[in-house]
Image (cartoon, grey):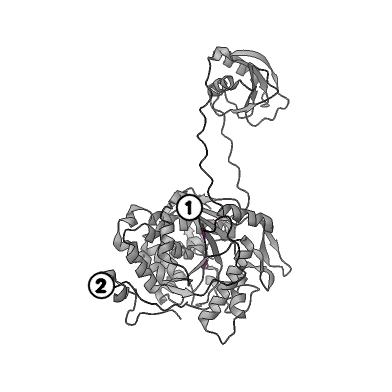
Amino acid sequence: MRRENPGSGGDRQVPARLDPRAGRTGSSRTRSQAADASAEEGAAPAHRRTGRAATAATAARAVAGVLSVVLLAGSGWGWYLGQVAEATVNRTDAIPTDGNDGTGDAPEAVNLLLVGNDSRANLTDEQLASLNAGTDAGINTDTMILVHIPADGSRASFVSFPRDSYVAIPGYGMDKLNAAYAYGYAETPETASAEARQAGGAQLLVQTISGLTGLQIDHYAEVDLLGFFNLSSVVGGVEVNLCKAVDDSKWSGAVFPAGVQTISGAEALEFVRQRHGLPRGDFDRIVRQQVFIAGVLRKMLSDEVMLDLGRQRQLVEAASQSLTIDQGLDLFQLAEQMQSVTAGSIEFQTIPFVGTDRDERDRSIIRLEDEDTLHQFFAELSAEPEAPAAATPAAPKTVAPSAVTVDVYNGSGTSGLAAQAAGALETAGFAVGTTGNADSSDYDATLIRFAAGDEALAQTLAAAIPGAKTQKSQDADSGTVQLVLGSDFNAVGQAVDPAAPAAPAEGEDARTAADTGCIN
């Protein structure tokens, strides 16, 4: 049961024994966990949610745990804020003693599993009404994010796990990932305390994620709906950017115009809950969750917060009051490890997946990549940063255009383009050798081919056609540069058309917390 501070109807204050102004350094605390657990479709029968609010599990709720430690790291009075957080944070025995193996190539790194749940036990009637959250206070782990922090604290990687990922759950075979917690909760004896049953759920989820990633999960943090609601309000709103206007009033309540806008409270919850009407459904919802977390992190790292001590304390209190962490997590120590992190060094990704499918029970599931691919992905995530690359050598020197002989070949598919380019090159002072058609008429990119030792000649021609690709080739004669015109060619003296960005492959789209581009 969640601890309460007798006599405080609202926000809890740090006990006097923990207030550094009183000259005390702290004492023991009660370690417990809040709420109940619920099962998703096909999971073990804990509590089942009802009503439209059943979709309210979002990664944005998990932001509280990370925000609290990032805030501590950036503050000169971090020790005091650490005591404020420890006074109200709840603890659970989430890390199992077995079935949680592997450290990757960096044993000093930290792997933290963030879990968002649907607990609404601490919401007031007014908050329940404004969020359309119903009255069920169950827990559902629809949001799972692995946060990897390397030993040097130079960056942080957030990897989201879709709730419908079809995975091996130890002792239960293949099932949806969000069933793991419910199975672990249900297998704990009914005579055990609620805290013990929740710890059982957390431990099985940790074992499942460890087997899936090949990594040891060092720490666990769970955040409920109140944490998300309070943080998004206390931070003063988060800026997001939508490519198109959306209207999902029937389901999530999300109704937003296109463009940049600031959201908080109920609007923020609607933003991260929406999946209906989005091109990729749950995958786009995951991107929204990541974008919202990134926005809050940018706010946390801004002068607006870092120079406002009162705002810092409010945010730490809002985070810790709705946060449940494992017994061994030292918030202040983790904050110190993260103190070098910047918005540009915080990356968000989704676990590599193949696509959607149906299981033997005709449920919609997400097929992930094979085990070797997943383990390689997470091994690279946890690898030590490579040594800085050697200094880039200086670009080859150029020569006078009159010293460059160019053979021009037309691969663009546009008739007569080689002759036009040859005339323009002569006007620009180049010597033209032969002209003709290339071996194919469907070159997308303009190429400048040259023989070994003719780098200066190729560089001179490249300066006259910005954006053209240079390529060392055994087919080029020494002393003569080949110009193969592609469909991107415009004219001598003009840049080629930039290549259209390739669409990200499923499971491979990534962004940093500094990215403010529009999303679905």
Please tell me which residue is depicted at 53% across the width and 48% down the height of the picture. 385
Q: Which mark is residue 82?
A: none
What is the quadrant of residue 500 in the picture? top right
- Residue 187: where, in percent of width, then height? 62, 80
The answer to the question of whether label 1 and label 2 lie on touching residues, with beta carbons closer than 8 A, is no
Residue of label 2: 22
- Report whether 58 appears left or right of 20: right
What is the quadrant of residue 204 in the picture? bottom right
Residue 88 versus residue 36: which sits nearer the camera?
88
User: Which amino acid type is shown beneath numbered disc 1?
Assistant: Arg
- Report whether 99 appears left or right of 223: right
Magenta stretch contains residue 395: no
Distance (Cα) linking label 1 and label 2: 36 Å
Please tell me which residue is depicted at 57% across the width and 13% down the height of the picture. 403
Question: Is 491 placed above or below 89 here?
Answer: above
Q: Which residues are magenta?
A: 105-116
Please tell me which residue is depicted at 56% across the width and 59% down the height of the picture. 160
Q: Which mark is residue 155?
A: 1
The earlier-in-sequence mark between 1 and 2 is 2
Magenta stretch contains residue 110: yes
Whether residue 264 is visible = no
Mark 1 closeness class: few <14, some 14–19, many ≥20 residues within 10 Å: many
Mark 2 closeness class: few <14, some 14–19, many ≥20 residues within 10 Å: few
- Residue 287: where, in percent of width, then height? 53, 56
What is the quadrant of residue 177 in the picture? bottom right
- Residue 382: where, in percent of width, then height? 56, 55
Please tell me which residue is depicted at 58% across the width and 28% down the height of the picture. 468
Q: Nearer the viewer, mark 1 or mark 2?
A: 2
Whether residue 117 is visible = yes
